[in-house]
């Protein structure tokens, strides 16, 4: 490996040395629940944390370990825990530092599942209160901070508003109050935006999307960027001994305190671990992340420009388009491009939208995004269908809005399909 390997080298080699048992060049799939110890003494040492070694695949697995190390390297973090899904990663990232009575301040522009988790039931049911505020307004975050606030949460690019928050403004406000920042970088990816450079402390991902990239596996990850000092009195869980784990103190000033605690408590006790097979498939995806992202960005920008010029299109939302509300922030945070996902409003409202979607042949109508294949959906009736009309408006989702995820196919074939849909919608 190079002395300080760059991003594209880390995508392919990060976290892996060829398998010591076999020399296997590809990352082997360690499809096992457990690991044989040489003898009873060695087993006892590993369980007592006096020696390192794999224990049980709910907690650690060599294939998953490569994925965790690789994503941590790509984000510039100190460690990571892979999970069964993006949702479990998001839940763990919050539960790792929030107890009953604690509060979170989050952007209102969120993935539908996260919005439901935060505002409608789950966290509320367990006594954690989430305030949802405007992602463009750091002062709105600050206004909700109090002594019970444990974290700030937002998405590097909102889904499906395709908005880019005032990332540095929000991080500065949080840090002034000794509060860490968790950011969902699913739509950003570490290739398009390096959140550590802008003040984020914890990154979460749905690896289901760009990172896996081929629509084959559900997965998530929490990455500790090692930047936050947990010793400011708000987080006794890092300074007091954990009696369920040999009285270990996670250490408020340790760069891996957060992620160590997450693995040894949440992953061990609630078990939303990633399967080795999914880790293998997602690693395959990550090997080509930058190449795919460049093509996604290039195809999406071309489609956005052509849609904007089409007379059946009312408006297009894609931050790389000149005139977009987030154009300047895109230039600042997403220098390499804005990814595959864009939305537009079709003339003729919901009915025209349905005709459009039903006329497409290359695009698949489904609930995923960020796949090599082009995808389409109508968020108001599907992914965000659990939200009230008011909540939809607050999250920036218009009833007639159509979300596209532009794949890696030839852009002329993609456009031919979209044009067919637009012409069908014109005829009604
Ligand atoms: C899909 C998605 C999630 C949820 O991830 P799953 O892997 O489906 O559980 C969270 N955040 C964003 C931004 C997403 O797009």
Image (spheres, rainbow, N blue to C red):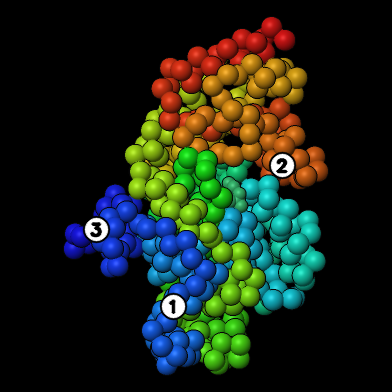
- Element on which disc 2 rests: loop
The local crowd at label 3, few if under 14, some if 14 to 19, many if 20 or more residues have their Cα within 10 Å, is few
Q: Position of residue 250 (x, y in %)?
A: 50, 84
Q: Earlier in the sequence, mark 2 or mark 3?
A: 3
| Residue 5: image tag | 3
| Residue 302: image tag | none
Q: Out of 420 and 334, give the one closest to the viewer.
A: 420
Q: Position of residue 398 (x, y in %)?
A: 71, 33
Q: Out of 349 and 34, give the one closest to the viewer.
A: 34
- Element on which disc 3 rests: loop
Mark 1–mark 2 CB contact (< 8 Å): no
In the picture, which quadrant includes the C terminus?
Answer: top right
Where is mark 2, residue-wise?
384
Q: Label 3 CB, ligand 1: below 8 Å?
A: no
The local crowd at label 2, few if under 14, some if 14 to 19, many if 20 or more residues have their Cα within 10 Å, is many
Query: Does residue 56 appear in this view?
Result: yes
Where is mark 1, residue-wise?
36
């Amino acid at each position: 490996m190079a002395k300080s390997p760059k991003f594209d080298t880390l995508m392919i080699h990060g976290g892996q040395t060829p398998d010591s048992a076999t020399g296997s060049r590809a990352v082997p799939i360690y499809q096992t629940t457990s690991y044989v110890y040489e003898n009873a003494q060695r087993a006892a040492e590993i369980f007592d944390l006096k020696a390192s070694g794999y224990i049980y695949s709910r907690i650690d697995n060599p294939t998953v370990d490569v994925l965790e190390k690789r994503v941590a390297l790509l984000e510039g973090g100190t460690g990571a825990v892979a999970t069964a899904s993006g949702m479990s990663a998001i839940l763990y990232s919050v539960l790792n530092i929030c107890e009953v009575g604690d509060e979170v301040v989050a952007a209102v522009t969120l993935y539908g599942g996260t919005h439901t988790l935060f505002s409608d039931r789950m966290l509320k049911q367990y006594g954690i209160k989430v305030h949802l505020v405007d992602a463009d307004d750091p002062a709105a975050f600050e206004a909700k901070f109090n002594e019970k606030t444990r974290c700030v949460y937002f998405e590097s690019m909102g889904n499906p508003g395709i908005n880019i928050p005032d990332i540095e403004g929000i991080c500065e406000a949080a840090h002034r109050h000794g509060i860490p920042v968790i950011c969902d970088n699913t739509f950003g990816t570490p290739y398009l935006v390096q959140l550590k450079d802008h003040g984020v402390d914890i990154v979460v991902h749905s690896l289901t999307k760009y990172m896996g990239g081929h629509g084959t596996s559900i997965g998530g990850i929490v990455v500790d960027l090692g930047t936050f000092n947990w010793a400011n009195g708000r987080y006794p869980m890092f300074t007091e001994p954990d009696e369920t784990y040999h009285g270990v103190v996670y250490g408020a000033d340790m760069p891996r305190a957060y992620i160590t605690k997450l693995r040894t408590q949440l992953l061990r006790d609630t078990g939303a671990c990633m399967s080795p097979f999914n880790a293998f498939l997602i690693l395959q995806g990550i090997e080509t992340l930058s190449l795919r992202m460049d093509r996604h960005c290039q195809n999406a920008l071309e489609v956005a420009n052509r849609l904007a010029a089409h007379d059946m299109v009312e408006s297009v939302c894609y931050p790389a388009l000149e005139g977009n509300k987030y154009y300047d922030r895109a230039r600042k945070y997403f220098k390499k491009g804005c990814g595959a996902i864009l939305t537009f409003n079709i003339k003729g409202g919901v009915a025209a939208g349905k005709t459009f979607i039903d006329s497409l042949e290359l695009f698949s109508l489904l609930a995923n995004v960020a796949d090599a294949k082009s995808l389409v959906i109508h968020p108001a009736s599907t992914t965000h269908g659990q939200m009230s009309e008011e909540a939809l408006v607050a999250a920036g989702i218009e009833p007639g809005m159509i979300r596209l995820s532009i794949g890696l196919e030839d852009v002329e074939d993609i456009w031919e399909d979209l044009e067919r849909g637009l012409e069908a919608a014109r005829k009604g």
